[in-house]
Image (spheres, rainbow, N blue to C red):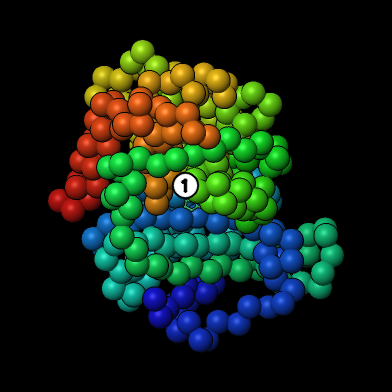
């Protein structure tokens, strides 16, 4: 909203110059994060920063800035943009160099870009739930890395939107992995199921918060993969992400979950999640 964190400085949007040979632009060679901001406060910021550095490390990018410095700059960005409720998008690419697939030399510095966007929480989705559709998971085998390469996710989400759905629930063969930009959960007979955090899914920060919420409200958790048909027979299904929080899924490819209603456990998890957002304000 007017300003961008560009490398180690906050500049006016019109001062940024993106190099045509930036490897993010040409190869999707970089990593990113999205952080939610509630009433001017960043939610789970340390977890997001830690995951960014971890994703970068996994693709051998050394971010030329300490975590503390990045935290401070993101905080300043939220202040200068006067962001109330919305999110910060930030990415780090391997830098700009003459186009060649292999890494450039050490003198090429990674490029950091971050900016904010004001947007309302999708409250109606939380209350009424959304529709989803199954889409084959054709992504690569390192979904644990929050990489800028999002073609598999882009194609899946587009297919969902064209079918009038909010999210694509991805599956490899019969096994449900995650959503195109969310983690997927199911509740059956009072147990919460979600895919284990391995190379086939992104270990969502919201996923971790929701698992913590489940513990707090006495809902047992099993980090176990489940099938497409098991998903359709779940008592409750929901997806989570930084921007989607806890979004109930009330139908998948036309099959209603819980008769098309938001389930009781989902409501309890949403309420518990809300208490964590409120805690930000009383810090
Ligand atoms: N799985 C995938 C494939 C994602 O892209 C995301 C987040 C998640 C799970 C959920 O992770 P968080 O709980 O940490 O957000 N996608 C981000 C995105 O691209 N926009 O918003 C969030």
Residue 126 at least partly seen: yes
Q: In this view, does 88 lie to the left or right of 138?
A: left
Please provide percent x and percent y for residue 236.
37, 26
The residue at the point 55 percent across, 82 percent down is: 16
Q: Is residue 91 left or right of residue 149?
A: left
Q: In which quarter of the image is residue 70?
A: bottom left
Tell me the element at label 1.
loop
How many neighbours does mark 1 have within 10 angstroms: few (below 14), some (14-19), or many (20 or more)? some
Camera-side residue: 221 or 125? 125
Please provide percent x and percent y for residue 220.
35, 17
Q: In which quarter of the image is residue 211?
A: top left
Q: Quadrant of residue 39?
A: bottom left
The residue at the point 52 percent across, 18 percent down is: 230
Q: In this view, does 92 lie to the left or right of 259?
A: right
Please provide percent x and percent y for residue 9.
47, 76
> Which residue extends farthest bottom?
14
The residue at the point 39 percent across, 67 percent down is: 117
The residue at the point 52 percent across, 86 percent down is: 15
Check the image and report above or below for 140 versus 147: above
> Which residue extends farthest front?
254
Q: Is mark 1 within 8 Å of ligand 1?
A: no
> Which residue extends farthest top?
189
Check the image and report above or below for 13 versus 125: below
Camera-side residue: 193 or 279? 193
Check the image and report above or below for 47 versus 187: below
Kindly identify which residue carries mark 1. 166
Please provide percent x and percent y for residue 188.
40, 17
Residue 46 at least partly seen: no
Q: If the image is split into quadrants, where does the N terminus sit?
A: bottom left
Camera-side residue: 165 or 80? 165
């Amino acid at each position: 909203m007017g300003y961008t964190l560009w490398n180690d400085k906050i500049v006016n949007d019109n001062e940024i110059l993106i190099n045509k040979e930036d490897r993010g632009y040409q190869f999707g060679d970089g990593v990113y994060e999205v952080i939610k901001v509630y009433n001017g406060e960043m939610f789970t910021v340390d977890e997001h920063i830690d995951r960014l550095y971890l994703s970068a490390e996994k693709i051998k990018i050394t971010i030329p800035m300490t975590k503390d410095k990045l935290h401070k700059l993101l905080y300043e960005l939220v202040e200068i943009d006067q962001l109330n409720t919305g999110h910060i998008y930030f990415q780090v690419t391997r830098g700009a160099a003459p186009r060649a697939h292999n890494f450039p030399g050490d003198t090429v510095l990674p490029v950091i870009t971050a900016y904010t966007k004001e947007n309302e929480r999708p409250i109606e989705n939380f209350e009424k739930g959304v529709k989803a559709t199954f889409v084959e998971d054709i992504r690569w085998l390192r979904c644990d890395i929050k990489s800028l390469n999002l073609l598999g996710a882009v194609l899946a989400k587009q297919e969902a939107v064209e079918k009038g759905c909010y999210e694509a629930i991805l599956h490899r063969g019969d096994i449900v992995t995650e959503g195109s930009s969310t983690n997927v959960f199911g509740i059956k007979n009072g147990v919460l199921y979600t895919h284990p955090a391995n190379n086939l899914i992104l270990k969502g920060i919201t996923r971790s918060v929701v698992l913590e919420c489940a513990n707090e409200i006495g809902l047992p958790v099993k980090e176990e993969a489940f099938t497409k048909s098991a998903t359709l027979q779940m008592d409750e299904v929901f997806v989570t992400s930084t921007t989607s929080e806890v979004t109930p899924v009330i139908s998948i490819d036309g099959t209603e979950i819980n008769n098309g209603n938001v389930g009781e456990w989902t409501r309890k998890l949403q309420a518990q999640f809300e208490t964590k957002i409120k805690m930000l304000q009383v810090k």
